[in-house]
Amino acid sequence: MHVALPRKWRPRTFDDLVGQEAAARTLSNAISEGRTASAYLLTGPRGVGKTSTARILARALNCEKGPTVRPCGECASCREILARGDSLDVHEIDGASNRKIENARELIETVRYAPQRDRFRIAIIDEVHMLTAEAFNALLKTLEEPPPHARFILASTELHKIPATIVSRCQRFSFRALTVAEIAEQLGKVAKQEKIKVTAGALSMLAAAAEGSLRDALSLLDQAATLSGGAVDEAGCAQILALVDRDLLEGIFSAAASGDRGAAVATLTKLLDAGEDPRRIFKELLSLLRRLLMLAAGARADLPEADQKRLSALSRAIPYENLLRAVSLGIEADALAKRAEDAGVVLQMFVLKLAELPRLRRIEESLSGIPSAPAAAPEPPVSSAGSGEPRGPRILSLVSVEAEPGAAPGAPAPPDAITRFYDLLDSRRRVTWAHAKLAESLRVEGDDLVLRFGIDKAAAKEALEEPNVRKLLAEVAREAFGRSLRIVLKTGPPADGDLGQAAREVPRESLSRERASNRAEGDPVVRSAMELFRAELTEVKEEE
Ligand SMILES: [Zn+2]
């Protein structure tokens, strides 16, 4: 019979607990020194070992050979708890399950009576914050004058919902979310023992998707292994995780970051048309923005290495302030989407707002009255955008405006020739003209005419790759530029695969700020900085 991995690998001793060394050590010390409290409160995110710890603790307290850090595993108490989670004298309720919560008060009253067989009468109450006011009162009464044989082990994911009067009477232990690396390492160990073949990339994907919960990660590994017949790779994981197409998601960001509202909405529509749930897209888009913000703030990101590299580059493609605004907008819109009947509309509005961010003037500039100086900004690429487009400070472009290493030094094509090129194309074949207009930039590089498309416009580029269309482009180019040019179509970031160029185009002030924030290593500092910025952002008037 197949035993689910989370169950099979549930920690059974303090030493088995992964990532909760502090809690495990304190608890072990207290038990070996014979200092046991009448109530313990284990708090922290889901799936990180709270309930397992409660059961280990119950065994440690009630083992025939105990109290001991190493329960024997053979006495009646140990065996019962190992098999079912509770025993004759250990009662377990889960506040999250309605059926049992009704009995909470009754159970709390029961614990006042002497144990039937073992040393202590123990109540394990999971998700204790769900208790009714009545049950909390009974609990409080018992904790105020705890009978010597009564022990309470409370666990909760929501500490703030537990009455302070209860919290103050407990010995409290915080459990933390695990890092991607910790989870991946543990998954690797389990996979090896279970003889599941799994690639390193797949381990990272599963670990990242588990969001700090080892239990969730094990369950995902289980599903992936079952589905793939014991050989788990990245493709299989993507299927299990039902991930929103990552390229499209990042495409939305790229398009919005360069102020291209049309492309941003088109990419979003593609996802919606593919049947993705708008709330799911929202969740992932928001989590992408948060990651980018953390990276931009110089925080060490808890990410698989490949993602780290790609996302670092993306995070530098938009000024830090705008990234802060984006996250802040996202949080507001997310709350709205949860209430809205049509979350898709909220999502569209949010994406459009994102695409407006590049048009905002810098606060400092607004305050000092100095107009944004185009001289300080990099030379914008020859834009193919219609002349009606606002020519705001397009500080950011995901596309290199510098020549690629090794390529002939590029020169912007003469504006007249470009106009001629497009006009001719328009008269010859309107569809092709429309596709070509979607290029971010059009340059003559040596004998090449290079059209570069944003990552999100790959479809337009593809359309131009048709042999007939290429031929047409070459003909029109010869006529417009007065000489033969080879048509070169490119997509996305420079060929070296990183967006370092775009990053280097970020204004100098942003870079020095980035250096400053790099010094602010460590999450707490960055987090408080975020709080500060958010507070400040509500007062900033954004100008057209
Ligand atoms: Zn025992």
Image (spheres, rainbow, N blue to C red):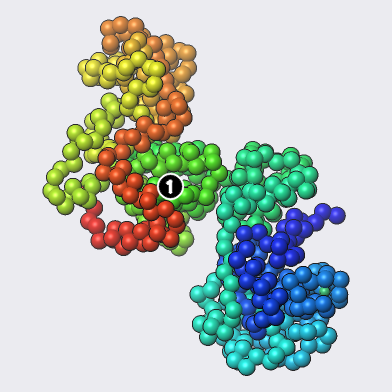
Q: Is mark 1 within 8 Å of ligand 1?
A: no
Q: Quadrant of residue 54?
A: bottom right
Q: Is residue 120 above or below residue 227?
A: below
Ligand 1 lies in which image quarter? bottom right
Q: Residue 430 appears at what percent x and percent y?
A: 35, 21
* Count of all numbered marks drawn on residues in the image: 1
Q: Is residue 110 above or below residue 329?
A: below
Label 1 is placed on what type of residue? Leu
- Is residue 296 something one can see in this rendering? yes
Q: Is residue 17 above or below residue 381?
A: below
- Which residue is depicted at the point 42% across and 20% down? 489
- Which residue is depicted at the point 45% across and 22% down? 463
323 left or right of 199 in image: left
Q: Residue 353 appears at what percent x and percent y?
A: 34, 49
Mark 1 crowd level (few <14, some 14–19, many ≥20, 10 Å Cα): many
Q: Residue 168 appears at what percent x and percent y?
A: 53, 83
- Which residue is depicted at the point 28% across and 18% down? 411
- Is residue 246 something one can see in this rendering? no
Q: Residue 216 appears at what percent x and percent y?
A: 65, 56
79 left or right of 240 in image: right
Image quadrant holding the N terminus, namely bottom right
SS at mark 1 in the image:
helix
- Which residue is depicted at the point 66% across and 81% down? 35
Residue closest to the eye, 69 or 445: 69
Residue closest to the eye, 526 or 313: 526
193 left or right of 353 in image: right
Q: Is residue 298 above or below residue 270?
A: below
Residue that sits furthest to the top in the current view: 483
Residue that sits furthest to the left in the current view: 369
Q: Quadrant of residue 501?
A: top left
Mark 1 sits on what residue?
295
